[in-house]
Image: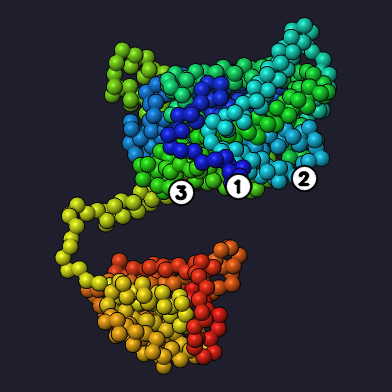
Amino acid sequence: MSLIDLLFGRPLATDEDRAQRVGVSSGIPIFGLDALGSAAYGPEAALTILLPLGLLSAQYIVPITLAVIGVLGIVYFSYLQTIEAYPSGGGSYTVATQNLGTFPGLLAAAALMIDYVLVAAVGIAAGVGALVSAFPILQPHTVALCLAILVAITIVNLRGVREAGLFFMAPTYVFVGSLGLIILAGIWRTLASGGHPLPIVAPPKIMVPQAGVGLWLMVRAFSNGCTAITGVEAVSNGVPAFRDPNTRNARSTLTAIISILIILLVGIAILCRAYHITATIPGRTGYESVLSQLVGAVAGKGIFYYICIGSILLVLALQANTAFAGFPRLCRTVAENGYLPFAFAERGRRLVYSRGIFVLAILSGLLLVAFQGVTDRLIPLFAVGAFLAFTLSQAGMVAHWTRVRGPKAAHSILINGAGALVTGLTVVVVIVSKFREGAWLTLLVIPAILMVMYKVRRHYDRVSSEIAHSEPLAVDRLCPPLVVVPIERWSRIAERTLRFALALSPDIIALHVDHGEHRENLSDRWDELVIQPTKNAGLPSPKLVVLQSPYRLVVTLILRFVLELQRKHVNRHIAVVVPEIVEKHWYQYFLHKQRGKVLSLALIFKGNQRISIINLPWHLDEQPAKTPQPVLENSKVSDEAA
């Protein structure tokens, strides 16, 4: 088994696609890790904003969480409608494009792309943050740990959708189970103590209040808490990945994800209030995540603490898988419409959209390095893209139901209209509250992505217009090309190249560059080596042209010569036959000058349709041994690949 097969698995045939589809149980970890994992950092993001309130921050987390859940519920019902109406997937991009137009669709796509990149970066950063909370000695290695986890997730996703689901299933359900047990135990202890439970491990010392409660502070905390809603979009993007009936399975998966998330958010908020748990300052000595404090307060820091924190770490780190499931599929849909390179629409060896996976991994890695893997630094960039996509999707669904009509149209318009209104207001709140903290960067990146998309489409339109042709094959005015054969010295490679050229055309120019360092006297022997044999065989004799190059500009002189031929022979095609040595081992290529490859590239970029390049490979060690032939004076080791 090769290393590639060991890492990524054997290649999958196209007809194995159905076997790669997933059900509800594996759909939850594939498409729901982002939403479920956000329960770990959504409340903490809100509590971090409330730090100036000191102990009061724990009291206000409950109403803020309920407000977030209200938005989550509206988004949930809206996406149930989207899945049913658009079972082919595509999510916000498809809905906005088909109902609102091209620009709103691309705006939704750009917003979602940013969201997915941030989902991957924030998830991994939050996971490493949980690990650092349990083992503070690892804090100096935060970035390295983030990148290592990113590489591992990338490899798992390149192995295919089904294997990714199986791989992430155990950590997901251990996380939900262990955190669920902590919430149940904490609520039971809270009720048993009359609402004032004693923590087994006391939370860190609470900061002295530095500010009073204000509307602006609550708005900022709400906008940070809304990061818990991101990830809901992924299921609607990936409907085709589910087994039949895919619509029903997708809706069931979304329902399960939202239900679990609501339970976790409510439970965490209640216990934070009961145990007086607040956030600590991220990135500083003494930092401890909210969930670490919560588990320690309810269960102590024994074996169960490390099991629970370990599962939280895994889910937070692996929740990036939601982005790896959604981003490549979104890129595929956009690419099929010509607004991204077509390569994004091609599936790789394991029936996944590999190029999208690689791009996501690279962009997420750059963000993790730039922001040093600290979750709180990434959070301000986070929710803008997600809620902008939500808004456009819901507005598109309103237009969809208005156009389609039907018995449930009025009810659906009400749901999607409410979704568009609420998420639209949330976008405004998030942008205003986080503008100085980094949201301005998202507002700059979205137009840049839109500009790239339009330029890609304009390029494809221009290419399509230029190469479009509906006429039958033209067979008139055909003539052999004028063939140019660069020759460094006489050798078996030169002989084979000329034989090939003689089969193409009677008009052949052998081109030799003499740079004065080692004269081969090729002109003196040309008659003996080439002219006489071709005359005896009744074939046209190739013409030898020698170019003098005192400054050793071999490729440049050949290029100029070919371009001059192109200008002189306006009605002829020119074929340049470029011999190249093919080595058995990659490292042996460094032993040759590789002028052939340089010449081919130069002709591609400098020439036009009338210049054709024919690469003629000479595979070393594949020719039978022959009696050595006479060679020219002062000849050196052959390098026809030049």
Would residue 35 be visible to someone looking at this image? no
Q: Are marks 2 and 3 in contact (CB under 8 Å)?
A: no
Would residue 631 be visible to someone looking at this image? yes
Q: Alpha-carbon neighbours of circle 1 within 10 Å: few (<14), some, or many (≥20)?
A: few
Q: Are marks 1 and 2 in contact (CB under 8 Å)?
A: no
Nearer to us in this view, 260 or 599: 599
Residue 153: give x, y in percent of width and height. Answer: 61, 38
User: In the current view of this chain or complex, which residue is farthest to the left?
Assistant: 476
Cα–Cα gap, marks 1 and 3 = 41 Å
- Look at the image and tell me in which quarter the N terminus lies: top right
- Disc on the earlier residue, 1 or 3: 1
- Disc on the earlier residue, 2 or 3: 2
Closer to the eye: label 2 or 3 = 2
Q: Which mark is residue 2?
A: 1
Q: Say what amino acid the circle numbered 2 marks.
A: Pro
Q: How is the image coloured?
A: rainbow
Q: Say what amino acid the circle numbered 3 marks.
A: Ala
The image quadrant that residue 344 belongs to is top left
Q: Which mark is residue 140?
A: 2
Q: Which mark is residue 258?
A: none
Q: Say what amino acid the circle numbered 1 marks.
A: Ser
